[in-house]
Amino acid sequence: MSVLTVFLAAHGPADGVRDVLTDLSAAGLLDPFLWIDEHDAMAGTAGVTATSVAGGESSTIALQNVLASTRVTRVRLCVLVPFIEGAQAVRVDSERAIADMLVANSGSAQLVRLRMILTRGGARVPASAVPALAGWHNLLIAPEDSNGPGMGHVSLEATKDAVVIGRNAAPVIAGIAGLWAHAQHAPFDDLHVVPGDAIRLVRSFYRRLETSGAEHDLREQVLDIGGPLPLPLDAGGSVVYVEDVSLATGRMAQNLWTKHRGMLVGSRVPRPVDEGSQAIGLWRALVMFFSFIGSALRNAPMAFYNRVSRGVSGAVAATVNSAVFGSDSSAYTIVVNGVGPDGRSVKWSEFSDASRQMMTALDPGTENRHHAASADLSRLWSDYSAGALTLADAGERSQGLPPVQVGANRAVIRIAGDIVPGKAQRFTDVPGIIAASTGVSGLDAHDVMAISDFRAQLRELEQDQVLGLEARRTVSAVDAWGQTIRRSYGFAFGQILAEGMHSTRSEISSLLTKLRAHSGFEDQSEGIRGRQRSLARWAQIITFLSIVIMGVAGYLTYRDVLVWWHCALIVVVAIIIWFSSLFILFTRSQQELFQMINRQRRATGELEADQANLRTALRDLDRLSAAYRQHVSWSGALGAFLAEPLGKAPKRSGSARQINWGLPRSAAIGSARPEAVRIVEVAERLRSELFTVGWMTSPWDELARGAGDHLGALGLDVRQSPELLYAKQGWGSGSALDVWSSKLAAGEIELDGADVVWERALAELGGSKASLITELVSSVEVRGEGQSRILTLDGFMAGVGVRGEFAESGFFDRTLLTDLASTSGRAAVRGGRADQARLGLGLIAVTTQFSEGLAREELQFGGEGKVAVDEYSYEIPVSPDSVALGGFSGAPSAAPVSDPFRAPSIDGMNF
């Protein structure tokens, strides 16, 4: 606390004031204060005990301990002085002792000294009462009761009843002492002390307008997003609702996929184009021909085959071995056939593990590098969130994800569940026997793969004689439910990821089948080798025959059977026939060999492309699986947020300030009672100002930035760098994102965006929309004397809290003034202070009025007539220049000289 309020009083009428102040404190209307009985004060300044009152609870504490343990900038010492016959007053020595102790022990705190005189018209002044002390605000609480400043009043009759006295005096004392909670009303803190023994008449008025019920209803109407999402205000045009929801959400999901497809799906290596048979030049043909002849004559036809097909078969065999036969057989079965070891269809989550096993078998050195590179999909999920929010509030957040346009206007989705379904759209109609068999008790509307897996399980259970009927019923229920969720943005993007995973798995299956087909080339090569050996034998026979013919021709020429030119002609013809026969035989018989070699060379290129594409496809499947897990987590978080972007409305709480009896006319508490139609009208006008284009950005960012606060040690890095949340692993990983999303979907994390928006609403109502408050509080219910009345706002406020003429005009009750003082206008209000404070839509208003300083001779009490001044012990203040002016000395006087014509010192001067 920065201000400490201390009351000092004696037993008697002041007890009624204390009790009423305690009751007001229990109602939450007063700030804490301390109460000291004079008996405790006279026990000595060392160890003064006081009663601390806060919230209606009382406790005994040591005043010095409070001062020593509290930082206080101002202390108000309020002494209650009863001017009621028979009442005991606080002795002057006690007042001074407490004041000196407060000054000495409160450090540099300012001490405000207030003496409040309690009296009633016609009451006799006790002999021990001291009306005024120099250096104090001497305040006489006017014995009157009025609704407001400037209005007529009721003079209070003389009484000794402490309760009756406290009922009327306590609210006035609370205003004088600055005790009204939230009011910031302390009229005498900075007001100068009237010199001498002058006494001011004072009165105070209090009004508190309670609007907790109306505020709750209005807040509920303004911030409740359980129905249609609000149409945001667009300065450049109007915002409308989307009619074709499927088209809008599907386009947004497709735009997101197009923008980020490159980080999820790698590029493929094109397969070599079939260029047909390659033309072979004459020289190369001759070289190959004579090479074949040489190999055939040496009886080594396979040497020619090996030279021609070198580098083809070996590469094929080695690659096929590594790619296909070296992979894990179970992983191969899962990826290619989609069947687990138990013969049932595997779940989508098993594809990721299987693809990782095959990827490791293909290239063990790339696995760690791949996972390190594929972990960061933060830009994708930042844009996924931005797309969902854009569909909800038409704000532009990310390039490539524009708001939906309907003509020239922006458009938003009407229902939050059509953007990203939340807990309310979850499928839970799963019979217990089916849940026990499948392990599935419910389905999230955005989890496309889980829905597909569950339907596959149900199709298999349909063949079961026991579970078949329930399985078919559940399939029908799932299909009917699926029709209601398919148009959402979360489902649409999940379906794109699911289709990507399915097409990638099909591609992997096709590539593995092609790779396995390459093993057939070795069998084809064996047939080609056999035909090559047969061809070599024919070449040997033809060559042998040609040599025989040429040998016979030479022999006959040697025997002169043939002439030499006949022999030459035979030899030439034989060579030509030999060459032609062998060349024709070679070209025709080797066509199959060249075709096989071309196929193998083309297959080698295809194999290399298939290998590269297989590695890429396996990485894509693993990356898409990881992305889908993150999709499940982010959709769960967004679904929970969009369902209640501003959190749940607070529960209605009854006001603790229900006072049905006891308050005087000067203090009143009223409750606003607006009509339901008026609340709806005001709410709609506020919503149009509060929900502007892009209004969801701030609540979502605050929610994401605070994710680490709900995760304990797991969220340490997220607390330091909130952007890391977007890069975390998704569903089933136990990561910060997985845990945060689960807690959010389960309602374990409360959204508090409503407080920020409601503060903006209150700012609007306190500024440009101030007229709306008047509409809400035009009818005020006031309870008093066991009855309830409905007043207008002006009738209830009665000018309380209004500055200017209302606060500084009027007349006090003249009962305590002499005739001369009354006719001289001394009962006029000469000063006042009015303050107002807002509490939500409610209002607290306080006005305190006081007169100018009155001399003791201008006041009279019942039965005393003209009271001699020396009957009372009080001080006459000494001005700083009194010695120079020949006035009073600085020594205190035992009793002043009775001189009714001698005026006290005023403003430091003596007259």
Image (spheres, helix red, strand yellow):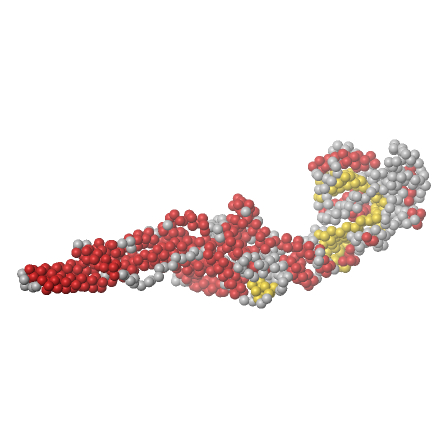
In the shown orientation, is residue 402 left or right of residue 299?
A: right
Q: Quadrant of the N terminus?
A: top right
> Count the marks: how many?
0
Of 38 and 675, which appears nearest the observer? 675
Q: Residue at x 12, y 62 (%)?
A: 568
Q: x and y percent of residue 366 in the render?
A: 40, 49
Residue 763 visible in rendering? yes
Q: x and y percent of residue 535 in the render?
A: 19, 60
In the shown orientation, is residue 303 left or right of residue 112?
A: left
User: On the image, which quarter does residue 236 sit in?
Assistant: bottom right
Q: Is residue 195 above or below residue 815?
A: above
User: On the image, which quarter does residue 557 sit in?
Assistant: bottom left
User: On the image, which quarter does residue 136 sit in?
Assistant: top right
Q: Is residue 426 above or below residue 90?
A: below
Q: Quadrant of the C terminus?
A: top right
Q: Is residue 64 above or below residue 156?
A: above
Q: Residue at x 35, y 53 (%)?
A: 330
In the shown orientation, is residue 850 left or right of residue 730?
A: right
Of 145 and 527, which appears nearest the observer? 527
Q: Is residue 492 above or below residue 143?
A: below
Q: x and y percent of residue 866 in the render?
A: 93, 43
Q: Residue at x 15, y 62 (%)?
A: 575
Residue 213 visible in rendering? no
Q: x and y percent of residue 726 in the render?
A: 52, 51
Q: Residue at x 41, y 60 (%)?
A: 503
